Image (cartoon, rainbow, N blue to C red):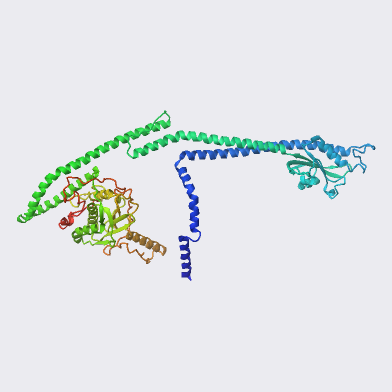
Amino acid sequence: MTQEAGRKTSWGGRLLQDGAPGGPVLRLVVRWLRRPLLPAARLWRRNIQLRVVAATLLMSLGVVVLLGFVVIGAVRNGLLETKEKAAVSQSAGGFAVAKDKAGTPVSSGDDSTSGRGSGSSVSWRNDLVTQLASSGQGAFYVVALGSASSDSDSASSNRGPRASGFVDPRASVPQSLRDSVDEGVGAFKTYTSIKFTDGQEAEPGLVVGTRLKDVDGQSYQLYYLFPLVQEERSLTLVKTTLATAGLFVVVLLGAIAWLVVRQVVTPVRMAAGVAERLSTGVLRERMKVTGEDDIARLGEAFNKMAQNLQGKINQLEELSRMQRRFVSDVSHELRTPLTTVRMAADVIHEARVDFDPVTARSAELLTGQLDRFESLLADLLEISRFDAGAAALEAEPIDLREVVRRVIEGAEPLAERKGTRIRVAGDEQPVVAEADARRVERVLRNLVVNAVEHGEGRDVVVRLAAAGGAVAVAVRDYGVGLKPGEATRVFNRFWRADPARARTTGGTGLGLSIAVEDARLHGGWLQAWGEPGGGSQFRLTLPRTADEPLRGSPIPLEPEDSRAARERAKAEAGAAQAQGNRLSSVPTPRLDRSTLPVPPTAPVRPRTSGPAASPAGLPGGGGAGGGRVVARPADAEPGARPVAERGEGSASPERLADMTDQEGSARGR
């Protein structure tokens, strides 16, 4: 049951991951919505002037809206308060007239003014409403209603509803107000909607009412209805005026903010443009300075900084040219005496069997040191070519498997003495690229010999791969490895991991520097990864065709076996902590067939790996810089051995057989 539930959960997770019905549609909708927003978001992030103006407009709009509400509320309250005072005063006079009219005695012959006879009482309330409404035509309406006790009387009786100006009395006077008037004493008021019986549109109004006695002594309700049409028009006029004025103020503030920010942002943009041009090498660029304000002082300081930088850079360039010239001149001048010394040393070395043991050993040492001297001189000449930009690339389609095979054959004698086995992976299919076979072989010879020297007798794995527009060769060893930060410094000239080591053994210290320049000349990368005690891996990545930009490498810089070891150690530590520090067996993650396992002779211990350098941060990861492709010099001897073919630790096959453990390559560390 548990397994079935797990299978259901896994199937559901795969559905969600692969995209259930509706998933692609949702992603399409999100992509469609994001497409028009991306340019606006990019403009918002990059334009400070737009952000300041937009923020000013939003804050101004908020202030104007808040101020408008406050002003409109104050005007509205003032208008209503004035209207209420006038309405209460007007209605109080009308109530007094109605009370006097109901209590004034009339003559026996005067039937028109409604005495107390039953014949004239029918028209008494109509006359009252007409008389009270006549004094305010259009200013107010008068409504007379019966009390609650007489509300059931018909409209034809003297206690029925009466109204002026076609007002609907029952619909215009709220029932709550009628109840308050009928139960209370004094005048009551409220806001209502005045409705008419002749089809006129309803109007907002204020109604004031009280309870009185009619001519017969019966209670009735008298109301004054005051329309608020004029007040509503006044309030609408105030709203329109405020909205127009507020919009004008917001636009004006936005324009002012734009002008002010433009005065500040324009010099900043100019400084950014000048700084970008300075970064590209145009050192004569300067800012245009006008005025004496803070921006002007900033421009003057920027120009002074640029001038100082230009002077320092020119000074350093001149010093660098002098150094390169010195190295080149010294290297060339040393070739002639070195040739003579080499010839004499060869004669002495061939006759060493006739010498005593001490002299014979001295002859052997002399020959070995002359080999190192020649290698150093060749490397210096090659470095000088790279520095001068005169390195020539002779690219042609080559199969890297053949190059790797030649390199391994040359390194076999050294590997046998070190007890190291060199294995090759990924050579089942051709790995073809347009490259300079001589330079690629020199790079791989440096990497393989260095791996054997520093592998501490463990296996060295050379892995080839090709994918997309790139090919790669990785050399993996399981020796001392690299400390954090050494992955980038290992390519520096004459750099060693242990500065205390004497440079009486090993290579020239220029092998990896020349190798990274060779990779850069191809438009490729030479990168390093390592962890203390876990070995290291050097990866050479080249484009399949010349002048094709690299977008990635088919081999990961950090080897899979090291990553698996760290994951296994992390899983074991978590299981031990969860079970109370008891030992637990954690299954080993199964690696891919292409993953290179740790040799059984020296298992890799899980350590914290050093940071892997990115292509942009490494000396060989920035494209085809550092050298340029030029034609082969006309005076080059056909078939002559290329200068600086032997990089650091890159002895020829004949020399490798004579190398001792103390005269191994130092790998430039």
- Name the residue nearer the viewer: 351 or 16: 16
Residue 173 makes an appearance in the image? no
Q: Nearer the viewer, residue 379 or 468?
A: 468
Q: Quadrant of residue 85?
A: top right
Q: Residue drawn 29% across and 37% down?
A: 313
Residue 272, position as x, y percentages in the image = 39, 38
Q: Quadrant of residue 331?
A: top left
Percent position of residue 283, x then y: 32, 36
Q: Is residue 244 toward the left or the right of residue 130 in the image?
A: left
Specify whether 441 is left or right of 552. Answer: left
In the displayed structure, 101 sits above or below 339; it is above
Residue 560 vs residue 143: left or right? left
- Return the x and y of residue 161 as percentages of the image width and height: 83, 45
| Residue 563 in view of the camera | yes
Looking at this rendering, what residue extends furthest in the top direction? 291
Residue most extreme to the right: 108
Q: How many marks?
A: 0
Give the x, y percent position of residue 577.
40, 62
The residue lying furthest to the bottom in this view is 1
